[in-house]
Image: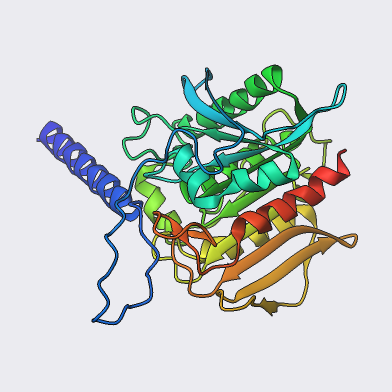
Amino acid sequence: MARRSRLFSLSALTRAYQRNLKAFARAARPVRAKAPAAPRRVVPAPAVPARRAASKPVPARGEWVGGVAPGPAGARRYHLYIPPGLALKADEKLPLLVMLHGCGQTGGDLAAATRMNRLAARERFLVLYPEQERMANAHGCWNWFERRNGKAQAEAATLLAAVDKVARRYPVDLARVAVAGLSAGASMAVLMAALYPQRFCAVAMHSGVAPGTAESAATALAAMHGRRAAHLPEPLGVSLNQGATSSALPLPPLLVLHGDADGVVSVRNAAATALLWADALGARAGALRTLQRGQRHAMRVTEFKTRGCTVVALREVAGLAHAWSGGVAQLPFSDPAGPDASALVWAFVARQFAKNE
């Protein structure tokens, strides 16, 4: 009877785990920003289906170089965008921005939706778009939540291996590397910055989950809904002096972007991450401001400063769902009505790059 009872409980646990996985997959499906309702007399344009981005996203100028990086989680493909006409000086190296896609996306999709390559061409920086393997996650999500079994840490190390491989082959300044992402990519970006703070001079998290809130797929949904406490994981490869406190952690400056109408990842994750990061850096919050440019969604801004410098910037966008703010219209995970997140990310990381030139 004891054996039968134990088998029954294991079976129930398995079914519960599978239900959580299915629910997590449903929650992570791509969503489109709602377009304004058109008058009935107007014939609507044909719907643009969710698609994979072209092999060379906009802009077409420049190089879109593919590669594969091996690491603890196995090999991961990537694409590197190299702006045209760089005309580098002797020994000149360029900053690198790592962009991590969300569930149901590819690196090319993120490049197309964000138009980050256009900024890179104008501002002279390289952009790395790693690619999640469907064998590692059937929905193309980075496994930021699989910390208990070590899969999240292994993927973070593999992404770092991609940065190092690109730096060996191209003129990358390793003192000026930043990481950004959307949704699952944002969750992995902030986890990478927490695990390897010495490797990044800035991190940007758009619609991501606070670090340390999930340990497995079974806890990922609660974390996405903002129902689990956030905490910083122990950094890897960083030696703290005996008696050092959390405020001594050398975390890179953080930009947090999130829509308050996000029905996939709760906006509570934005404030939780900002407060967690600010506390670790000993930063204090400034006055809340509301900014709006033209007809775009308004944005609530809180900056956390230490010694007069902004080390955490929190930007909550009114009316924005689970989408890249200010992105290309009619693409999944993209809302053109929001503030230009790509410009905000670049402005934030560029200030940190300037300090390390």
Give 215 or 180, whichever is nearer the viewer. 180
Q: Position of residue 23 (x, y in %)?
A: 28, 52
Q: How many marks?
A: 0
Which quarter shows the C terminus? top right
The colour style of the image is: rainbow
- Foreground residue among 204 and 335: 335
Horizontally, residue 2 falls left or right of residue 117, namely left
Picture coordinates of residue 66 (x, y %)?
52, 24
Say above or below: 265 vs 128.
below
Q: Position of residue 145 (x, y in %)?
A: 45, 42
Q: Can you say which quadrant of the picture contains the N terminus? A: top left
Residue at point 55%, 74% (across, down): 297
Classify 21 as above or below 304: above
Is any atom of residue 330 visible in this view? Answer: yes
**Place of residue 208 in the rendered image (x, y in percent of width and height, measured from the top left):** 52, 53
**Which quarter of the figure has residue 31?**
bottom left
